[in-house]
Image (cartoon, rainbow, N blue to C red):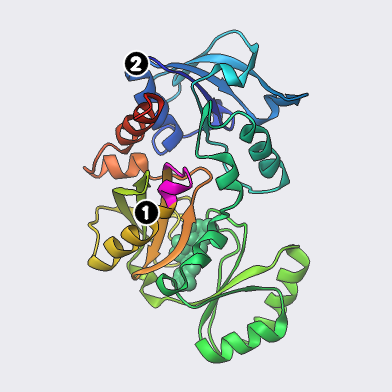
């Protein structure tokens, strides 16, 4: 089977191919004989009822500095493609939301991965709140009295933006920390949205585990251990990827959320688990494929394409 695939992603010239999950997916698609077309989010348009993008044929190579070749730009109705990969990175802002509204028009006749309406409905730190018993105690608000009461109850807390990414503005506040008032003021002027207040999990020093699920099934995992002088495990903040297995609790988490992911058309999902507590369900543009494989784990990109091909074959 040879599929026509369009990928909506950020500029390909800027990606770091060693760690980029989208790139791993593209390499695997090309290996399977699928035809690739590339466009950036700013080339997308809705005219009347038809969704268009100016796309370029794409060839990829696993060679840093020479990783892609683009052909001539052509305006195409996206409905002509079998599959559109929505792989634009956050920020999850109104531009992102608008993209999901546009792509929703062609799905599922053209299979959009992940399902754009479901991506819109599942912001990573919000979707997870459907599973409070799997999470650390968590509060989403900007109300001072609510946060103060939560702090009294839970002691050390973390404050982080609701639509943050890559560890941006994640703070730990000890129960006696006198900076709380100022940090609260800073958050109120910096963020228009409510933010996340969460019980601090000291075991974060042993890592924040990224677990990848493909169509609701466990596919691979990597532990990310923060640098000794940082709270944040994100690899962009100096976190180190380590080989890992799933604990019984982590298997239980996968079993609990897997069916909901499958039902919602969230084919490629990355969840984050600290000390057995679920903190995020990443559906926009999850990462981790290359880290899993580099540590000797399974080929998640192949699993994703097996699943997409099955769905296109109507199985
Ligand atoms: N409740 C918490 N307890 C301890 N560490 C946390 C907590 N929440 C976040 N962190 C640390 O901050 C990092 C980034 O937070 P996260 O919620 O994953 O947001 P982001 O979307 O920015 O990755 C985590 O990988 C972890 O190292
Ligand atoms: Mg995270």
Residue 93, percent from left and from top: 69, 48
Residue 50, percent from left and from top: 70, 22
Residue depicted at x 40% and y 17% = 34
What segment carries the magenta color? Answer: 261-267
Residue depicted at x 27% and y 36% = 299
Quarter assignment of residue 300: top left
Quarter assignment of residue 268: top left
Residue 20 located within the stretch drawn in magenta: no
Residue 263 located within the stretch drawn in magenta: yes
> Tag count in the figure?
2
Residue 55, percent from left and from top: 61, 17
For label 2, count other residues whose C-alpha is less than 10 Å away and answer few (under 14), some (14-19) or many (20+). Answer: few
Residue bearing mark 1: 258
Q: Quadrant of the C terminus?
A: top left
Q: Quadrant of the N terminus?
A: top left
Instruction: Check the image and report above or below for 69 versus 286.
Output: above
Q: Is residue 35 left or right of residue 139?
A: left
Residue depicted at x 44% and y 21% = 67
Residue bearing mark 2: 1
């Amino acid at each position: 089977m040879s599929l026509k695939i369009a990928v909506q992603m950020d500029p390909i010239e800027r990606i770091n191919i060693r760690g980029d999950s989208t790139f791993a997916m593209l390499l695997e698609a090309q290996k399977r004989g699928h035809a690739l077309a590339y466009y950036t989010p700013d080339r997308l348009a809705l005219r009347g009822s038809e969704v268009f993008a100016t796309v370029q044929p794409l060839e990829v190579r696993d060679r840093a500095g020479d990783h892609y070749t683009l052909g001539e730009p052509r305006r195409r109705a996206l409905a002509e493609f079998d599959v559109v990969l929505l792989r634009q990175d956050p920020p999850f802002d109104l531009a992102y939301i608008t993209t999901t509204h546009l792509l929703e028009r062609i799905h599922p006749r053209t299979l959009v991965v992940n399902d754009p309406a479901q991506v819109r409905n599942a912001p990573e730190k919000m979707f997870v709140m459907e599973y409070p018993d799997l999470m650390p105690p968590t509060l989403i608000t900007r109300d001072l009295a609510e946060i103060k009461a939560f702090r009294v109850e839970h002691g050390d807390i973390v404050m982080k933006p609701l639509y943050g990414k890559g560890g941006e503005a994640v703070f730990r506040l000890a129960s006696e920390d006198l900076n709380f008032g100022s940090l609260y003021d800073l958050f109120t002027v910096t963020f228009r949205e409510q933010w996340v207040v969460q019980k601090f999990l000291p075991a974060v020093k042993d890592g924040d585990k990224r677990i990848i699920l493909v169509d609701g099934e466990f596919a691979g995992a990597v532990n990310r251990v923060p640098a000794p002088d940082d709270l944040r495990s994100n690899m962009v903040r100096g976190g180190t990827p380590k080989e890992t297995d799933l604990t019984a609790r982590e298997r239980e988490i996968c079993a609990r959320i897997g069916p909901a992911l499958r039902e919602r058309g969230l084919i490629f999902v990355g969840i984050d688990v600290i000390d057995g507590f679920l903190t995020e369900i990443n559906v926009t543009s999850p990462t981790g494929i290359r880290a899993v494989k580099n540590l000797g784990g399974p080929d998640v990109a192949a699993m994703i394409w097996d699943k997409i091909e099955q769905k296109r074959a109507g199985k």
